[in-house]
Image: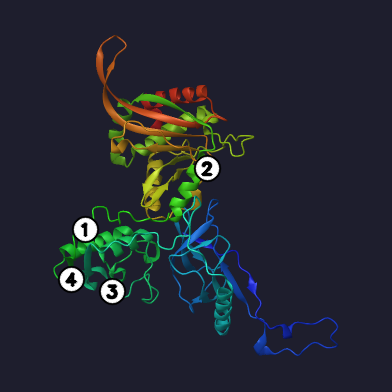
Amino acid sequence: MSSHLLHTSFIPTAPPSLRRRPGCASPLPRTPLLVQSKIREIFMPALSSTMTEGKIVSWIKSEGDKLSKGESVVVVESDKADMDVESFYDGYLAAIVVDEGLSAAVGSTIALLAETEEEIALAIAQSKKTSSSSPAPAPPAPTSDAPKVFDEMPSPAPAMKASVGTNALGSAEHPASEGGKRVVASPYAKKLAKDFGVDLKGVFGSGPNGRVVAKDVEAALAAAKVSGGGGKVQTSEPPKPSGVDLGSVVPFTTMQGAVSRNMVESLAVPTFRVGYTFTTDALDALYKKIKSKGVTMTALLAKATALALVKHPVVNSSCRDGKSFTYNTHINVAVAVAIDGGLITPVLQDADKVDIYTLSRKWKELVDKARAKQLQPNEYTTGSFTLSNLGMFGVDRFDAILPPGTGAIMAVGASQPTVVGTKDGRIGMKTQMQVNVTADHRVIYGADLAAFLQTLSKIIEDPKDLTF
């Protein structure tokens, strides 16, 4: 993923003596060596509509490196994803203002870009002048706003030391290390490597442009355990139960800060909840029949929900200003996914129009991108209705919090065999699933939700339309 550095500005470096003064009889002669330099400020970009600050995950380029337009310069952690940010100009990365691991507000300067190699020294001087004139920042105080994160992870003592040989994991110079200067890795991969003492320079990255992701570190650990001499694992001390320092105070990550703001914002919306019980025997039978073709239960539930929303557009509507509401033109079903350090809702767009097989493939793709923190903003911010499923954990019922800007969210529990009474007065066994829908009461009323759930129940109990 990438984003252009669209916001830059010129920093004039010519001395005042070169500026034309009013009333002068003749202009000063031009001196070629003192032409006004083009030093551009690189700003922290807004990578999503809700982003207020970003964290520098890693600088792909180093100070002094030559840059080409469209070339990735830095990896920024937004409120939901890690994104490669590209240079919008040719030039040289003259000075890095915000180091790796630090956060900066959207629109603030994170680096300086010089047009020529000769201007690098001027940019460095400008950077030092700016930093020296700025007051030292006070330590961040814990508040309800997202704090600037200086070290988002605690520092537990290494539980395991893995010395990984290059014969097992590739060459000594990492493909994503810019000549061995640094290795580009996801935040979670860096945490795993730190916890288990793995040198990332010896880990082959499977992410974009060779970036090391969590599964690469886990593979390195597994290889170190089984290799005979190329990778030895030495246990220095017993591993900690959860890999955290008990009693430590840990600032929110950028994602946790965004989740916190959204949850607080949602409290201002008047909501109500309606529960319903579905009989899922027919849906379970369909799932077993087409599971081998790559169909997932999540896709089936999303498809069924989307078809029901077609008949109840008010449940797919949204209210943002408290004075009006919008009947959304697209049925985009967002599905909550737990990832390391937070929660994200990848969106199955136009779920009512996409066939179940394509929908399942798209869902798997979105989940992989979400766990690698590679989702584009339009892939997690465009949901019009949300599903949250904890059934795979055996949870039979729960309530979900309404995401801001949407009309409703449905919490899905597990399908479980249940003893029920039949219409003829006998006792039978059926598989049933309980759901609770939380809705914005400014727009959606109880009768609206009841009618929607009745329609959804009919689709789930007779799911023949899901495969068309």
Q: What element carries label 1?
A: loop
Count neighbours of disc 4 (C-alpha within 10 A) and say few if under 14, some if 14 to 19, many if 20 or more: some
Task: Identify residue type, mark 1.
Answer: Pro
Question: In front: mark 3 or mark 2?
Answer: 2
User: Is there CB contact under 8 Å for labels 1 and 3?
Assistant: no
Residue that label 3 marks: 171
Where residue 57 appears, as percent x and y from the top left, is: 43, 64
Q: Distance between the residues labelled 3 and 4?
A: 13 Å
Instruction: Name which quarter of the figure residue 82 lies in.
Output: bottom left
Give the alpha-carbon distance from disc 1 to disc 2, as whole Å: 39 Å
Is label 3 in a helix, a strand or a loop? loop
Q: How crowded is mark 1: few (under 14 residues within 10 Å), some or many (20 or more)?
A: some
Q: Hey, what amino acid is under mark 3?
A: Ser
Alpha carbon separation for disc pair 1 and 3: 30 Å
Seen in the picture, residue 211 relative to 350 is either above or below; the reply is: below
> What residue is shown with label 4?
230
Q: Which coloring applies here?
A: rainbow
Q: Earlier in the sequence, mark 3 or mark 4?
A: 3
N-term mark: 1 or 2: 1
Judge the density around disc 3: few (<14), some (14-19), many (≥20) Cα neighbours within 10 Å: some
Which residue is located at x 48 percent, y 78 percent? 65
Mark 2 vs 4, N-terminal side:
4
